[in-house]
Image (cartoon, rainbow, N blue to C red):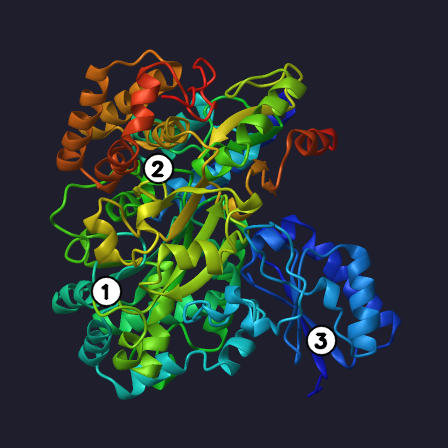
Amino acid sequence: MTVTSCNIQKPNLGEVIEKYKEFPGSLLDLLHEVQEIDGYLSRDVMQQIAEGLGISESKVYGVATFYSLFKTAPTGQFIIRICESAPCHIRGAQEVLEAIEETLGIKPGETTLDGKFTLEFTSCLGLCGVAPAIMINDQVYGNLTSDRVKEVLLNF
Amino acid sequence: MTIYRSHVLVCGGTPCVLKGARTLKDLLLKEIERYQLSDEIRVVETGCLGPCDDGPVLIVYPEGAMYSKLKPTDILKIVEHHLLKGRIVEELVFRERKSSAGALQGSAVPLEQEKYLSLQKRVVLRNCGRINPDSIDEYIANNGYLALGQAVTTLTSDQVVKIVADSKLQGRGGAGFPTGLKWSFTAKTTSDQKYIICNADEGEPGTFKDRLIMEGDPHGIIEGMAIAGYAVGASQGIIYIRGEYGLSIERMKNAIKQATDYGLLGKKILGTEFNFEIDVRSGAGAYVCGEETALIESLEGNRGEPRVKPPFPGIAGLWGKPTIVNNVETLANIAPIILNGPEWFRSIGTENCPGTKVFTMLGDINNQGLVEVPMGITLREIVYEVGGGIPGGRGFKMAQTGGTSGGCLPSEFLDMPMDYDTLSKVGSALGSGAMLIIDDTHCIVDVLKSFMKFFCHESCGKCTPCREGTTRLYEIVLALSEGTATDTEIQLLKELSGAMQLSALCGLGQSAPNSLLTCLNFFADEFQAHLNGQCPSGICKNLTIESEAV
């Protein structure tokens, strides 16, 4: 998300496009990998992908906006995904959500001013055995209470 | 080869890892080393052992003692008393819990007699928690790949299809379509390329069986896919795993590599003319991709929007080629069916729905986690025997079967057998096997709000009945919870639900109203109370708690 990362991003982007170019149907894999570069898919990046693969920009944008793991705008360094599905809901997800909102001062869909955290809802994470659960980037946390989630956030 | 006197199996399923299983395993290894027992005791990290709520869990063999809810100090005790001195640490042994007291049962019953385990029948989970999922040798030692060997060397493709058809195995992803029939359609087609897709895009809220099967026994799925490939004449398999399941993706990739190194995948498998390869692909967060044609769209690099059927994927699927899409659990059933025969499989479960079902028990239930039981077990047995009852001895209000797209059943259905046929007759579904138990402290409208919000968010937007319908359903339920709904709106809910069931393009929109309709049917009083501005459970904030007289 800084100027320097933009500079090193371009050659990488080309390599990724080159890698997947010959494989039909690999757009999702390509987008996953490209998103690793600077955390989201900018309009400029999507245009380059479309050009590289010889497909329309609207197709790339359509796919990027369909799946919740793809981002088309910058996000915080850490994305907190909170599960609000029924199994988490009845085990107190609302309380956990309120604790996160209170600690970070943001609502779902928002990013903290320092660019550290983005909070969003997710569908079921398949962690119902330890509900309520959240994911922070790739890391999963379960059996949360309002106190425990505050502790978890302190470690970031 | 070293012969160990004891094996310690540490559960490495995601729920236990979250509760610190890895740290405990390191401590265990350190303690074993300290007592110089490393040559006598082997520690194995396995897949899920089942009682997720009681994690972290480990089992010591040959005694078969399962220890639960472990803390670091418990590990010290287990090593010193059990592993060194040979005495089982009774106070740490897993006990089923009684609903009335919500407390641990004190008497020492042998582990296999605990109801939680004795009612289970493990076919799909045969290796989960018993072998190291990262070791193909351990899988082979438990008759792994024997069924594949038998199929490709002694059976014709048609014979394999017939065995699966005779077993009456039904798809375990939710719809319950007969697997043998599905295979027979594709087997009959001629094409230069056919595909076997394993649907591991598990997203039904409350379902985590596929995650734990993949984490616990990845080779069982690979073997099932290869047999399916042989049966229908496909040489390419794809496992589509949801992007959020990191450990599953890792385990499956590792297992595919091992099977390829051993010549069990690749060209000329076991010296025959049969070729089969498997790729792992991952999703990017879309519930609708669990629908088979949406999944295929996603694999082709498109938005995951369902296709109009027919043609069905069995005739024209991925890249227009004949494609079998089977759920993880369905495929994990294949090898045991080939090895033991269709009669054996039909001897388990009920006449019309044979075999076992993996259920995930969650919500207000003591033993949250994964169980595998014969089809046709009653709801009461699941809740009060396998599940250990409801915490704090509270009352049973309802169970939602089959995940968020299933229906809700009140207590008069406790003695109903759980199988595909029976549940669909009462407007519910066995679906993915998620059993969400809800106790009498919850409000129906509040719970429905969460269900409806989910569909509203996950509708892909392609067809109008689902895109508009899910949003309107949510709005009306929200109005009910805020006390602003009227009688007309209840009528509207019913009409809209009926229209969606009939006209939505795929299973998402068709099943979205299931929970709502069953609740309107079985909990009419509670809806009426909300129309009168009262929430009997005191959950909906804007409403008053109903007085006892009403």
Q: Quadrant of residue A119?
A: top right
Q: Can you say whether A143 is above or below A94 in the image? A: below
User: Which of these two is toward me, B504 or B289?
Assistant: B504
Q: Earlier in the sequence, mark 3 or mark 1?
A: 3
Q: Tell me, yes or no, whether dots 3 and 2 are on the same chain.
A: no
Q: Residue B443, position in %: x, y?
A: 42, 29
Mark 3 neighbour class, 10 Å CA radius: few under 14, some 14 to 19, many 20 or more: some
Tag shown at residue B46: none
Q: Quarter of the image containing the N terminus of chain B? A: bottom right
Observer-side mark, 1 or 2, equals 1
Tell me which amino acid carries mark 1.
Thr
Q: Is residue B448 visible?
A: yes
Tell me which amino acid carries mark 3.
Arg
The subunit carrying tag 1 is B
The subunit carrying tag 3 is B
Check contact, mark 3 vs mark 2: CB within 8 A. Answer: no
Q: Residue B190, position in %: x, y?
A: 13, 66
Q: Tell me the element at label 2.
A: helix
Q: Can you say whether B454 is above or below B383 in the image? A: above
What residue is at 20 percent from the left and 72 percent from the top?
B165
Give the alpha-carbon distance from disc 1 to disc 2, as whole Å: 38 Å
- Residue occupied by mark 3: B42
Mark 2 neighbour class, 10 Å CA radius: few under 14, some 14 to 19, many 20 or more: some
Q: Is residue B529 left or right of residue B108?
A: left
Tag shown at residue B179: 1
Q: Residue B202, position in %: x, y?
A: 40, 48
